[in-house]
Image (cartoon, helix red, strand yellow):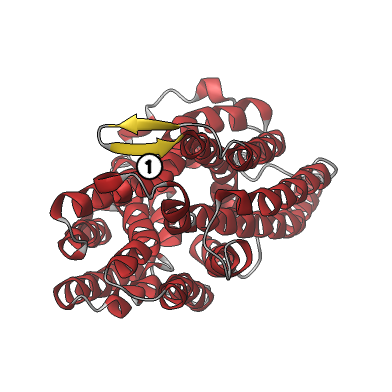
Amino acid sequence: MSETIEKTIVKDVQTKKNNTGPFLIMVGLMFIVGFLTVVNQQFQAPLQEALLSEAGALQNTLATFITFAFFMGYPTMGNIASSWVDNKGHKATLIRGLIMLVAALGIEALSAKFADLPSVAIGESSVPQAFFIFLVGSYALGCAMAVLQTVINPFIAVCVVPGTSSVTRLSIAGALNSIGTTIAPIFVASIIFGGVAPEVAQILLPLSILMVIIAVVAGVLGKIDLPNPMASEDGEEVDPSTLTKSIWSFKHLTLGVIAIFVYVGAEVAVGSNIVLHAKQIGIPKETYAFMATLYWGSMLVGRLCGSFLAKIPGQTQLLVTAGIALVLTVAGMLTQQLWLLVGIGLMHSIMWGAIFALAIDKLGPYTAKGSGALMIGVAGGAILPWLQGVSADALGDWQMTWTIVIICEAYLIYYALVGYKHNLD
């Protein structure tokens, strides 16, 4: 008996040691996710100028549809990706996601090759076919990101790294994610479209280079051992067929999906649409590019600080940040001082980790399925910023459209006060 216990202890120690390395790999992948997500969002303004100059009253609606298409990939692939995790494992699912990522960037790059195709008439508007090719690529990119995040987030939340909690691990990963999001606006504004009038042909070389980099990452990952941190407490894999409860029977998860929906919607609305709002009221390109950089950069600062908040409960972190974000949004909307909206980035910085940890808490063997369900909520990044763009076209102005973000922050306050509580037996 003592020998069996000793082997169990040794196995447990080895598992704990092994999880630190895979954790760092996941953190690196979070950088890629953050960088490419914001790169795709920051294409809105330059592609609006390059491809939508004849779109008339649909310019904002179509420009924000780039982000809509991207985030619609999440609900499409959320459940499929969690099924891949159950049946194929974490490593195989990650590699599939990276392959999809390469293909998606390739489709977006194709839009540059077909820029001379005839335009399509939509009412009184004229839209180049290249724009629709880019939209397909944007949707495929979102599908790939959903696959990656279905593995990355629960892995980070439950893997064993000494001296950390699930919230602090997600905050650490979020910090690397934010480094990517901070660099992305500069990359788009200065490197891809810097110094000249935007043309769709300018995206071809940068996207091709990114495809090569992602392909190399996939190849390296294929040679690395990746343990499964979602095993049961005795170290054995859980058979998915034995999980008989509906994932939607967990109330705190269901409300958490809504929380992810409104959080991502608010985060993306501010991060991407603040550029279009600033552009409309005549703020120079250099200034609104800096606004976007500062917004995502403040998320980086917040996540770096958030990694040291292990002793503060996730619900408390969410309550305080959502409350301040609501005040900043109201003040920014009423005064049309967009720098106040930039400050919301600091508040949004730790919300993802707090919501995710609260939503999958106590799910046990249902963690992978819960993560897939949360990916459905990321569709908020598609729907809410796009509805804001449609509203801006309908109202002829962006100012009152920030009401959408106010409603989002109010729901997050509710989730932090009530919605996160379990209904478990």
Q: Quadrant of residue 383?
A: top left
Q: Is residue 297 above or below residue 386?
A: below
Q: Residue furthest top?
A: 241
Where residue 231 appears, as percent x and y from the top left, is: 63, 39
Quarter of the image containing the N terminus?
top right
Picture residue at 80% right of the left edge, 52% below the top: 10
Where residue 182 appears, as percent x and y from the top left, is: 54, 70
Where residue 343 appears, as percent x and y from the top left, is: 35, 77
Q: What element does badge 1 sit on?
A: loop
Front one among 187 and 357: 187
Q: Is residue 159 visible?
A: no
Q: Amino acid at mark 1?
A: Ala
Q: Is residue 105 left or right of residue 271?
A: right
Picture residue at 63% right of the left edge, 66% below the top: 191
Q: Is residue 82 left or right of residue 271?
A: right
Mark 1, Cα crowd under 10 Å, few <14 / some 14-19 / many 20+, is: many
Picture residue at 35% right of the left edge, 44% below the top: 62
Where residue 239 appears, as percent x and y from the top left, is: 59, 25
Front one among 34 and 258: 34
Q: Is residue 11 visible?
A: yes
Q: Is residue 137 above or below residue 191?
A: above
Front one among 392 and 333: 392
Q: Is residue 86 left or right of residue 417?
A: right
Residue at the spot of label 1 = 379
Q: Quadrant of residue 76?
A: top left
